[in-house]
């Protein structure tokens, strides 16, 4: 059996020809694949300013990954490759860009639980940073795996939106009387079962779904979201829509079924999209 100690919390062991990660002496995970066989992670840090993340390079590495899965890699070679990658990750303050999301965030979370002060210091920062980066696969992973619950509403919104729009969403939270921010979803697509939710693209709100929120009046400040393309307010108690919606020039769809709206503001005819 080979063993390599990354730091006081992380140890890598080669057991029965498999590479395993141990945290505080307890088995954490078995390494599934050695990413970047051809380009070692310690070389990546030489140009880290131009490097987005392993996750964003994943598509470009599919052929490499596929060939690795179908080829024989000596267990000792794979073991030392994992050791090198995890050592560089630890030496670079647990930068989650340097490991695949499926390993980086669970590992970082576990380290915070066992008392790693450095991990505890960067955990929330890494979540916010990767949300702000905007890569869909990472955002989806962080949402579905529940990592956004570790951020306050302010931390969450200001990490994914420009400040002006984060302010508007915080105002909307208060207007909707959302006390538990876990109920206020970021969605990659508008899904009514997750409502209320908002969709983000390039740090701007492009969609809002306020399904069955008990709205009697749609707040005027919604019109300050100038990149909004889809507004869904289905199954509320609305009797009218604000004239100010005509200022959202990118607006393409308004979903209002399930309300009591009798007339549509004439000003909406000015919307060109």
Image (cartoon, helix red, strand yellow):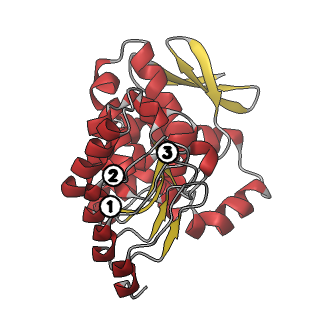
Contact? badges 2 and 1 (CB < 8 Å): yes
Q: Of all residues shown, which one is farthest toward the front?
A: 262
Instruction: Give the left or right position of residue 213, taking residue 69 as reference.
Output: left
Instruction: Give the left or right position of residue 197, taking residue 112 as reference.
Output: right
What residue appears at the point 44 percent right and 39 percent down from the top-left corner?
184
Q: Quadrant of the C terminus?
A: bottom left
First along the sequence among labels 2 and 1:
2
Q: Nearer the viewer, residue 166 or 158?
A: 166
Q: Quadrant of the N terminus?
A: top right
x and y percent of residue 9 in the render?
Answer: 43, 17
According to the image, label 3 marks what residue?
196
Q: Residues within 10 Å of mark 1 (few under 14, many from 20)?
A: many
Determine which of the numbered discs, if any, sits on residue 203 in the image. Answer: 1
The residues bearing labels 3 and 2 have C-alpha atoms spaced at a distance of 17 Å
What residue appears at the point 50 percent right and 47 percent down from the top-left corner?
237
The residues bearing labels 3 and 1 have C-alpha atoms spaced at a distance of 18 Å
Q: Nearer the viewer, residue 135 or 107?
A: 135
């Amino acid at each position: 059996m080979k063993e390599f100690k990354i730091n006081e919390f992380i140890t890598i062991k080669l057991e029965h020809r498999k590479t395993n990660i141990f945290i505080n002496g307890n088995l954490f995970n078995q390494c599934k694949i050695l990413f970047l066989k051809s380009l070692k992670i310690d070389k990546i840090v030489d140009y880290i300013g131009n490097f987005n993340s392993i996750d964003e390079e994943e598509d470009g590495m599919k052929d490499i990954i596929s060939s690795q899965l179908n080829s024989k890699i000596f267990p000792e070679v794979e073991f030392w490759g994992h050791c090198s990658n995890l050592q560089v990750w630890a030496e670079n303050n647990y930068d989650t860009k340097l490991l695949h999301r499926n390993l980086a965030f669970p590992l970082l979370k576990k380290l915070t639980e066992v008392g790693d002060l450095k991990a505890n210091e960067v955990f929330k920062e890494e979540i916010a940073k990767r949300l702000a980066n905007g890569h869909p696969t990472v955002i989806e992973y962080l949402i579905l795996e529940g990592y956004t619950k570790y951020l306050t509403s302010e931390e969450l919104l200001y990490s994914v939106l420009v400040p002006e729009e984060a302010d508007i969403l915080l105002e909307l939270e208060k207007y909707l009387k959302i006390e538990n921010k876990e109920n206020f979803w970021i969605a990659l697509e508008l899904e009514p079962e997750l409502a209320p939710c908002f969709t983000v693209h390039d740090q701007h709100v492009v969609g809002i779904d306020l399904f069955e929120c008990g709205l009697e009046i749609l707040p005027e400040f919604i019109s300050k979201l100038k990149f909004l393309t889809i507004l869904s307010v289905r199954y509320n108690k609305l009797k009218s829509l604000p004239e100010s919606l005509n200022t959202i020039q990118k607006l393409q769809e308004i979903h209002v079924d399930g309300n009591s709206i009798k007339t549509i503001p004439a000003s909406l005819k000015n919307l060109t999209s």
